[in-house]
């Protein structure tokens, strides 16, 4: 196993830190690393000192561009590029926001960073704020993650007390305030403009774009917003340099990221791997393969908002481009594994219920569409559907795609459209046999008559 | 009743933002903590400290799922029902709680001890199925764990605030350690008990 791993990742590459460096998950096993003394004993805040002493803000932006770091929140936008969209001067103050609202089903990396190594996040916030010439940063923590929120709050307090936040940080003349804020339960607040509404004390309704946050964001000022993991990677990039970080991954998807593995594998969990690592390596080597020796049926590789992959796509490299070429997305890094006993219609129903419940209600296609999608899927799953319902599902998705106010509406259609494409026979089976093809709702007598696409 | 002391804390929170209105969500959390749920009094206090209208605060309260508008049980058990937990048996777990507590999801036991709820993905999908009791996590929950949990809560033992049962791999020798761990076949996801 180790051999196959090595050959895949070391091909044509010099790897300064070995095949599996730990940039953003390092030291998480150190007891007490969540306290500032221990964090500093292990080299913490040295990258901040280096950033303040050896880099002008513009040089830092350049360094992050060079590293190839791309956003870990879902869209994978180039971080340094995003920062450079900020206007050089503006009448209103500019802000940096860390998006710690993690709530995409299948994703559980940001919570780990906050709980185990909150100072790494805080150090990243200070470095990122310095690079973007921001003097007030906000950390918006999902409301349900109370312990994570308290860990971050304490880290910020400790850093203030140590003179690492506040006036004249480490004698550099740079000033920064950091405010930790808490959400209150709304998936949509992970969307950047809805998050800003929420941070301003309102309902989390997305804003019309453009203008983009870099131009008009929080309190109307130019605003940088990045994901927890994106920001937490900054200390390692400053410490090791853009070249070392960029030596990992692929041409266009550089570095490492945390893959959150869940579902029917033996060892679910968070694994930091270079971008471009094949799905198979994650599932079989790191995840220990399928639970109970079952067959793989499908994979959702980037959180519940992205299309399915089939077992014959298990060798797809996990980078932004390869995933797009395979018809799906890397998204939030949440890799959800489904085994042969999973009813696809049931799983899709469960995911669609999420979007119905979390639709903010602002626009009609999403609010009404997600409602009707659930109605139809429920009917199909419980054996009362018609064959025309399958096309109706596609029809409703068509009427949502690109017609919703924000990407949540589009996201709701991914699992439905891709599952109908890949597992149409299984939908038809629900109609004809009035039962599931597999799983608890199946009647085996009927199941024999249909072969799922995945097994052909 | 929202005491002056709670209001003072609210004002202190609002002062951390360029605009006091930004304190609305955190102040509502405080109000809920103080009174058990968000009352008209709580809304009035938040309206006062944030300088916003009652209506505006109410529109926030009704938008976000964490604000309770009526009293809940002493222990709020929130079981994740999203996809990764679904794949690892959260529906069975939920039914088990319903049977054990004699209530349906969304209800509170007659003695006011337990409220049972289904909630969306809690960012613990690798430790599925999971639940929260009054905001603290219990992960990798079996039905036997659920029974033990109910007993502990009945005895008045709260669930401790602690990090999740993360599969943290040794980072010293980054590469090889992660590989060894991956190849060793040993379970890495310890149990938070
Ligand atoms: C419905 C919806 C939910 C989102 N949820 C999150 C989230 O929980 N965390 C996050 O970092 N980004 C989330 N995003 C993406 C953010 O809008 C934004 O692109 C991201 O925070 C930018 O950070 P990055 O460039 O570092 O990835 C969400 C987007 C949408 C449309
Ligand atoms: S697409 Fe859905 S979540 Fe987005 S604005 Fe419309 S209703 Fe709200
Ligand atoms: S699906 Fe249950 S914690 Fe994510």
Image (cartoon, coloured by chain):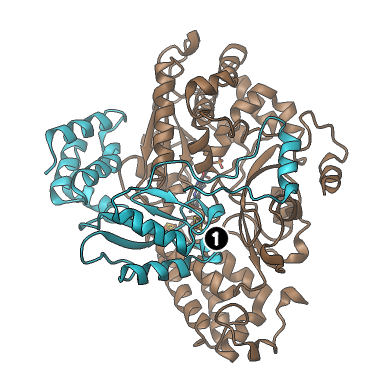
- The residue to which callout 1 is attached is B84
Q: Give the residue at x 63% y 73%.
A: A341
Where does the N terminus of chain B fall, quadrant-wise? Answer: top left
**Residue A359 seen in the figure:** no
Q: Which chain is cyan?
A: B
Q: From the Cβ of disc 1, is ligand 3 less than 8 Å away?
A: yes
Extreme residue toward the top, this view: A171
Question: x and y percent of residue B167 in the render?
Answer: 60, 45
| Horizontal side of residue A375 vs A392, given as left or right | left
Q: Which chain is brown?
A: A
- The chain under label 1 reads B
Near-viewer residue (B67 or A408): B67
Q: Is residue B33 above or below residue A265?
A: above
Near-viewer residue (A95 or B186): B186
For the residue carrying disc 1, how many other residues have a C-alpha within 10 Å: few (<14), some (14-19), or many (20+)? many
Q: Is residue A97 above or below residue B137?
A: above
| Horizontal side of residue B115 vs B51, given as left or right | right
Residue A15 position by quadrant: top right
Q: Is residue B183 above or below residue A455?
A: above
Question: x and y percent of residue A284 in the render?
Answer: 74, 55
Q: Give the residue at x 75% y 42%.
A: B179
Q: Secondary structure at mark 1?
A: helix
| Horizontal side of residue A226 vs B14, given as left or right | right
């Amino acid at each position: 196993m180790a051999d196959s791993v090595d050959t895949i990742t070391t091909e044509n590459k010099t790897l300064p830190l070995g095949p599996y460096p730990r940039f953003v998950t390092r030291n998480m096993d150190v007891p007490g690393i969540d306290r500032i003394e221990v964090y500093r004993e292990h080299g913490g805040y040295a990258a901040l000192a280096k950033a303040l002493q050896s880099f002008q803000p513009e040089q830092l932006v350049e360094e992050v561009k060079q590293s190839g770091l791309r956003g870990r929140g879902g869209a994978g936008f180039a971080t340094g590029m995003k920062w450079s969209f900020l206007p050089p001067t503006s009448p209103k103050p500019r802000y940096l926001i860390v998006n710690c609202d993690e709530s995409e089903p299948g994703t559980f990396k940001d919570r780990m960073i906050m709980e185990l190594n909150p100072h790494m996040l805080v150090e990243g916030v200070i470095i990122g704020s310095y690079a973007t010439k921001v003097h007030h940063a906000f950390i918006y923590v999902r409301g349900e993650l109370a312990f994570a929120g308290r860990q971050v709050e304490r880290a910020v307090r400790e850093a203030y007390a140590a003179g690492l936040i506040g006036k004249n940080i480490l004698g550099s003349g740079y000033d920064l305030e950091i405010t930790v804020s808490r959400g209150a339960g709304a998936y949509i607040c992970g969307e950047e403009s809805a998050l800003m509404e929420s941070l301003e004390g309102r309902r989390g309704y997305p804003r019309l774009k453009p203008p983009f946050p870099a131009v008009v964001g929080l309190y109307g000022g130019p605003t940088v917003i990045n994901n927890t993991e994106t920001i937490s990677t900054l200390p390692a990039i400053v410490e090791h340099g853009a070249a070392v970080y960029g030596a990992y991954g692929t041409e266009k998807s550089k570095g490492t990221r945390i893959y959150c593995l869940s579902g029917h594998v033996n060892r679910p969990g968070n694994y930091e791997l270079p971008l471009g690592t094949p799905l198979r390596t994650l599932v079989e080597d790191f995840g220990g393969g399928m639970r109970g020796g079952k067959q793989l049926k499908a994979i959702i590789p980037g959180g519940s908002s992205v299309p399915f992959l089939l077992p014959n796509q298990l060798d797809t490299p996990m980078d932004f481009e390869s995933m797009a070429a395979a018809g799906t997305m890397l998204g939030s890094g949440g890799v959800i594994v489904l085994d042969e006993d999973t009813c696809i219609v049931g799983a899709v129903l469960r995911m669609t219920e999420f979007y119905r419940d979390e639709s903010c209600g602002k626009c009609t296609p999403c609010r009404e569409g997600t409602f009707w999608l659930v109605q139809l899927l429920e009917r199909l799953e419980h054996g009362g559907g018609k064959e025309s319902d399958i096309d109706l599902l596609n029809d409703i998705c068509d009427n949502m795609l690109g017609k919703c106010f924000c990407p949540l509406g589009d996201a709701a259609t991914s699992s439905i459209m891709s599952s109908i494409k890949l597992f149409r026979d299984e939908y038809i089976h629900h109609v004809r046999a009035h039962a599931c093809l597999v799983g608890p709702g199946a009647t085996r007598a009927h199941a024999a008559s249909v072969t799922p696409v995945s097994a052909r | 009743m929202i005491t002056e002391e709670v209001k003072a804390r609210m004002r202190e929170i609002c002062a951390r933002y360029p605009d006091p209105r930004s304190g609305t969500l955190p102040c509502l959390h405080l109000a809920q903590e103080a009174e058990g749920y968000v009352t008209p009094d709580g809304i009035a206090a938040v309206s006062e400290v944030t300088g916003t209208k009652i209506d505006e605060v109410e529109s926030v309260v009704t938008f976000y799922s964490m604000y309770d508008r009526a009293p809940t049980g002493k222990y709020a058990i929130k079981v994740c029902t999203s996809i990764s937990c679904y794949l690892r048996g959260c529906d069975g777990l939920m039914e088990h709680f319903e049977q054990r507590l004699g209530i349906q999801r969304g209800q509170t036991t007659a003695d006011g001890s337990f409220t049972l709820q289904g909630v969306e993905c809690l960012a613990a999908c690798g430790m599925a199925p999971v639940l929260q009791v009054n905001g603290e996590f219990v992960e990798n929950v079996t039905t036997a764990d659920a029974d033990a949990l109910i007993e502990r809560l009945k005895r008045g033992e709260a669930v401790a605030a602690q990090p999740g049962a993360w599969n943290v791999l040794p980072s010293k020798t980054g590469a090889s350690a992660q590989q060894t761990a991956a190849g060793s076949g040993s379970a890495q996801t310890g149990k938070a008990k």
